[in-house]
Image (tube, rainbow, N blue to C red):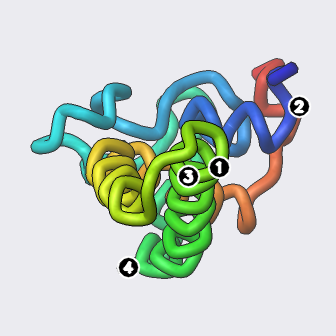
């Protein structure tokens, strides 16, 4: 269960890592590709700056690699082991999965990255 006040909540919803009161992104839908990289400068509730330093989210590329591998392994297991498809079909399933879930992987890796450096503060919610 995802409860406010946990890192899991902030990671999967894209909420402010400090107060969990609003989304970090200008457009919550990751499939609006022109807005996929657009992030608010700071939280309007607790004034937390999301861009801690210039090019802060470049580090999320390392996280994105791991998240992408997890999605690819899941696609392989589902297609090859559960659906008993050929290796070529499993490879195609991996490619389609990576393309289809690319924006979600990008946002998820950014959320994980910022949550490595910031923690929930229940005192900010009361303000």
From the image, tell me which residue sits under label 2: 122
Q: Dot 2 lies on which element? A: helix
Residue 63 visible in the displayed image: yes
Residue 85: x and y, percent? Answer: 47, 48
Residue 81 — which label? 1
Q: Position of residue 60 (x, y in %)?
A: 51, 72
Mark 3 lies on residue:
80
Task: Please tell me which residue is depicted at 63% across the width and 35% down the height of the picture.
Answer: 12
Which of the two marks, 1 or 2, is nearer to us in this view? 1
Determine which residue is flagged by label 4. 54
Distance in Å between CA atoms under marks 3 and 1: 4 Å
Q: Is residue 111 visible?
A: no
Disc 1 is placed on an element classified as helix
x, y percent for residue 26: 30, 33
So how many labels did they put on this image? 4
Q: What distance separates the C-alpha of mark 1 from that of mark 2? A: 44 Å
Check disc 2: other Cα within 10 Å, few if <14, some if 14-19, many if 20+: few
């Amino acid at each position: 269960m995802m409860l406010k006040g946990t890192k899991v909540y902030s990671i999967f919803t894209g909420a402010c890592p400090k107060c969990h009161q609003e989304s970090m992104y200008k457009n919550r839908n990751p499939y609006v590709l022109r807005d996929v990289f657009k992030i608010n400068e700071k939280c309007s509730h607790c004034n937390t700056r999301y861009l801690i330093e210039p090019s802060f989210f470049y580090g999320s590329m390392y996280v994105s690699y791991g998240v992408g591998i997890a999605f690819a392994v899941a696609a392989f297991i589902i297609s090859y082991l559960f659906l008993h498809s050929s290796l070529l079909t499993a490879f195609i399933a991996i490619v389609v999965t990576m393309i289809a879930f690319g924006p979600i992987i990008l946002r998820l890796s950014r959320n994980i990255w910022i949550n490595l450096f910031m923690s929930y503060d229940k005192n900010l919610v009361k303000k």
